[in-house]
Image: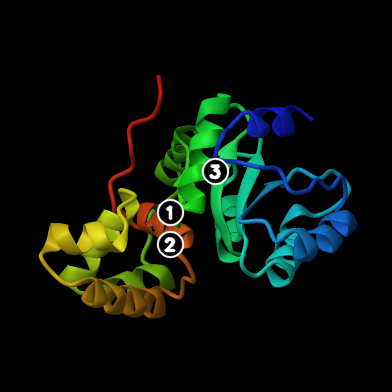
Amino acid sequence: MGLRVLIETQADMKVVGEAATCTEGLALAPTTAPNVILLDIDLGSENGLDFLRELKETATEARVLILTAVKHVETHRQAAKLGAAGIVSKEQPTDLLLKAIRKVHQGEVWLDRLMMGSLLDELTQSEKKVDAGQAKVDNLTTREREVIALIAEGLKNKQIAARLFISETTVTHHLSSIFSKLGVTDRLELVIYAFSYSLAKMPQKLS
């Protein structure tokens, strides 16, 4: 109810449906055709990640924004692999949630700064070692690394093209190659991968 009231106060947003269970969500998504789905992944007895997989298969055109209190890196990685376009901490203020909804709707990815801080904590505490992931990173070209760094900054293809003085088509080709080499499926998963293997600078944590 709180989210509905918040969203309905926005001139550019409209709530087209609400679901209290996974079953209701799967039945509602195809008929309401939402642009953005807000999914609370902390479902108690139900597995939020399993539901995310089913939801993406049912509502193929919708972009899913995850709401969660969990700050576990592997959970975020799995959500990204399953097609989430963004992850927002429940601890963040409502204005950031609204910003995240708009960014995801525009085709961008979203990880708020609390989530970034959580990623930074776990990644810096873990032992760095050469593994299959690092081997994939070693195959990237210099230009591909530049594109990844700009993706992590939140830039769109057109902005990346302007920054690197190349065409949008070339950026698209670079992204296809990057996704293939790293085995990622979308920009959010790529951003998490970039921070995991130091392909992009992690933003400063909030004090």
Name the side, left or right, on which 28 lies relative to 49: right
**Residue of label 3:** 101
| Disc 2 packing (10 Å; few <14; some 14–19; many ≥20) | many
**Residue of label 2:** 187
- Taking the spot 25% from the left edge, 71% from the top edge, the residue there is 171
Towards the viewer: 129 or 4: 4
Q: Residue furthest left?
A: 165
Q: Which mark is residue 108?
A: 1
Q: Position of residue 187 (x, y in %)?
A: 43, 62
Quarter of the N terminus within the rendering: top right
Which amino acid, by three-letter code, is at mark 3?
Ile
Name the side, left or right, on which 166 lies relative to 71: left
Q: Earlier in the sequence, mark 3 or mark 1?
A: 3
Q: Earlier in the sequence, mark 1 or mark 2?
A: 1
- Taking the spot 63% from the left edge, 47% from the top edge, the residue there is 66
Which amino acid, by three-letter code, is at mark 2?
Arg
**Is 198 rendered above or below residue 122?**
below
* Quadrant of the rendered image containing residue 178: bottom left
- Taking the spot 42% from the left edge, 51% from the top edge, the residue there is 127
Q: Position of residue 77 (x, y in %)?
A: 55, 57
- Taking the spot 30% from the left edge, 75% from the top edge, the residue there is 172
Label 1 sits on a secondary structure element that is: loop
**Is 158 rendered above or below residue 181?**
above
Which amino acid, by three-letter code, is at mark 1?
Glu
**Is 206 rendered above or below residue 183?**
above
* Labels 1 and 2 touching (C-beta < 8 A): yes
Instruction: Give the foreground label among 1 and 2.
Output: 1
Q: Earlier in the sequence, mark 2 or mark 3?
A: 3
